[in-house]
Amino acid sequence: MTIRKARFFFTSFSTPSTLIPNPSLRYFCTNTTAVKRISQVQYPLQFLEKSPQRNLIAVSSLLKKYGFPAPELPKFLEKNRRLLNLDLVKIEKSLKILLSLKPSQEFLVSVINSCPRVLEYDAIRKWEGGIRGLEEGSILSSLAIRNILEVSVKFELDYDCVLGSLKCLKDLGVSDITLNKVLETHPMVTMMCADKIHDSFEFFVDAFGVGNVEFDRILRVYPGVLAFGSQNKFKRLLGEFKVLGFNKDVIKKQLLRDPRILALEVGELSRCLELLKSLKCRESIKKDIFHDGAFKAGYEVKLRVDCLRNHGITLRDAYGVLWKEPRVILYHVEDVEKKIEFLLHVMKIDIPCLVEVPEYLGVNFEKHILPRFKVIDHLRSIGGLGDEVGLRELIKPSRMKFYNLYVKPYPECEAIYGRFARNTEVRSQHPVGMWKLFKPPNNPKSREDIMNIKSYMDSLA
């Protein structure tokens, strides 16, 4: 060992602060920069005392304590890192406030997931006293309370203003069921002051002649009556109804029958009535369509158009389907939905085929569509079809023609089809002997009639 190496060796040991062990490398390092880099790699959990990473375990443990699912915690805290900077004591206070509003673990987890800001004590402390102002015994659903908290925290609403809106609704005679429905579907109503809610009620009383009980039912079925700007739309809608010739009594009757007529767009009912006037169908079908009046008939057209549009048919094609096949209007919307679902998922036919063959929606499902499809499906499975049978070939032929083409040549299909099977008893339309009642009676000839006939014949001679 040279003199320089020996001096360096003893100098290194004379300053203990530079001697930092590295167990993985088994030697002593004297470079402080390298030491910091190595220590960060070897000991990643050495955080500052008040760092967000140090709060991670504490916040996770607190949320687990209150029932938050452990598998969802990492993803939740990754999205909401700001929670790691909050004081644990205040987070626990916020959790206790939430449980005081609705003592349910499911409610707690849902409201934290949908609006993590409720864990900030400054944003939620105004709800520490609960939801005051409602009648004793009034129960709000978990979804209603969650929506109230979300809107309140998001828009920083005043606590007294929110409670004033709820109290105004209760003073107008709104039931708990209706109040829950409104808060679950239109929570923005809590941003309306009590005066605006009262003005909406007065408008309905004057425009449609309804009372508190009737207003409660309308609000329950269609909570959108309290949406912002709805009064201007309802005024234009009411003006359209009057132009079409409907008086106040007819409008009120239809409103109480189905309050969803308020969801009509201005001009929509006029177009539906124009379609009905231009129908070219049997008079009996028209009579059944207008059985309950023109207003209800036009609204039924609107419901069928919406049903078809929900399945991807354009507005113009939807009106075209109803014009070509008016019998669709006579079937309930649920029956139309059932036929469309069967067409898409069982028959595996695309929805645009309805535009080409609208008759599919105008025939009975149990008596017409289902037996024919079973026959064709059976023949397809045994290779009995020469050409592919589409929707047009399935629906268009008459009963007898379909029977002669696809059922009669195959005896096993008669039991499937059923209508013209040999062992099936076909009931006659009229009782036996009823034809005698329609035989015109013989009028007896009087002596005067005979003399008149004889004199007429003599004049001809």
Image (tube, grey):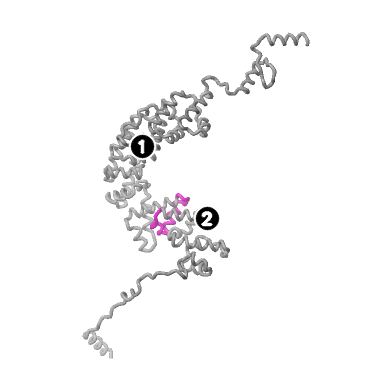
The residue carrying mark 2 is: 348
Q: Amino acid at mark 1?
A: Leu
Looking at the image, can residue 16 be seen?
yes
Label 2 Cα neighbours within 10 Å, binned few <14 / some 14-19 / many ≥20: few
Residue found at the very far front of the displayed protein: 65
- Which marked residue is nearer to the observer: mark 2 or mark 1? 1
Amino acid type at circle 2 is Lys
Q: Please provide percent x and percent y for residue 209.
A: 26, 45
Location of the N terminus by quadrant is top right
Instruction: Describe residue 252's horizontal placement relative to residue 325 as left or right.
Output: left
**Disc 1 target residue:** 140
Judge by depth and name the residue closer to the eye, 284 or 116. Answer: 116
Question: Residue at left 44%, top 56%?
Answer: 321
Q: Quadrant of residue 181?
A: top left
Image: magenta residue range: 310-333
For image coordinates 29% across by 41% down, the residue present is 203
**Magenta stretch: includes residue 330:** yes
Where is residue 227? Give x, y as percent. Answer: 36, 39
Q: Main secondary structure of the magenta part?
A: helix
Q: Is residue 452 above or below residue 194?
A: below
Q: Residue at x 64, y 21 (%)?
A: 38
Q: Is residue 313 magenta?
A: yes
Q: Is residue 442 above or below residue 173?
A: below
